[in-house]
Amino acid sequence: MSKDQLKAHYGSHEQPQDGLKIGILASNPKLYSNQRLMEAAAEHGHQVTFLNMRHCYMKMDAEEPEIHYRGGRLLNDLDAVITRIRPSMTFYGCALARQFESMGIYTTNTSTAITQSRDKLFSLQLLIKKGLNIPTTGFANSPIDTSDLIDMVGGAPLIVKLLEGTQGSGVVLAETRKAAESVINAFKALHANLLVQEFVKEANGKDLRCFVIDNKVVATIQREAAPGEFRANLHLGGTASVVRISQEERKLALDAAKTLGLKVAGVDIIRSSKGPLLLEVNSSPGLEGIETATGKDIAGMVITSIEKKLRWKKPA
């Protein structure tokens, strides 16, 4: 289906016979991931509507809770909502997801799961409580004992992360102790919450992105940082390639998604001398890099997951 056909389709309110009504709760309809999900839903015979979070508003009522869309359109008749909430909209996006859930509308990732995954500190605490391995990490709020905090994670080189950072922003590699002290002190001046994490040199600027749907790793890529960059994020110039993962890495990815309650997740893992270590669990993982590298229809798999949950079968 072309982009013009897709636009005409999801802009229409006519429901395909026996299809599901699916909303995509996000911010940018032109984003590759959202385009692909709309395309996949349409190809599966469903009515799909893009829901800009900023255009949604709620009626709080015990007997008749409602969500309205720009122009007064009522959204209570949706069967499912694909929750793709950008970090800057986490609070309001999760409030909307919670409202859909209270109305009995299925959400691919629940408000609780998204909230847990977005809080870097809380998510790490939940993961280590389950015995899942992460790089040694320190946490502080504008610490006075900078030197001890550095020692806590094994000294320099180390990674300093702003707790509110996302997609590689607010992440700094400090290669020497002096540089680490300077970065931490700079963040202290902002009165910021920060994480200090051991730098796993043997990872060599590479990580694994495992895409999990319904407790199954459906695709995995290895991301490699661009020359001179230590972060493997694709939007920072990193490259992606297909990779085979071990059973231990697969189990770690599945356990991480399950621990945070995510049905759809991108789990980032690095290979270290101590075995695989969890870096992060993303509740709105991008599709472009992994679909392009693997050739797999990940968007279609998300739609199939919804169909199975709602026990929908394509008419004969």
Image: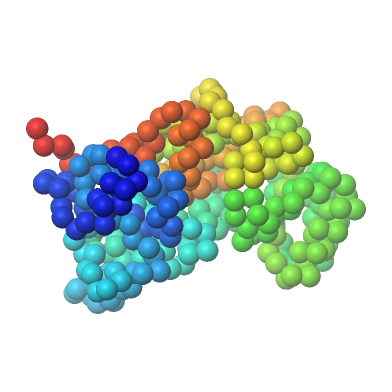
- Residue drawn at 53 percent across, 46 percent down: 281
Q: Nearer the viewer, residue 22 or 246?
A: 22
- Residue 217 location, quadrant: top left
Residue 118 x %, y %: 52, 56
**142 or 41, nearer to the observer:** 41
Quadrant location, the C terminus: top left
Provide residue 5's location: percent of width, then percent of height: 28, 46
Residue found 48% across the figure and 44% down from its top: 286
Image quarter hosting the N terminus: top left
Residue depicted at x 65% and y 33%: 224
Locate residue 314, reporting x and y percent. Answer: 15, 37
Give percent across and percent down for residue 99.
31, 66
Determine if residue 148 is in view: no
Quadrant of res 163: bottom right
161 above or below 67?
A: above
Residue at 29% x, 76% y is 60
Single out the residue that lies furthest toward the right: 178
Q: Is residue 90 above or below residue 260?
A: below
* Residue 8 shows in this picture: yes
Say left or right for 295 vs 245: left
Q: Is residue 212 left or right of residue 72?
A: right
Color scheme of the displayed model: rainbow
Left or right of 105 in this view: 51: right
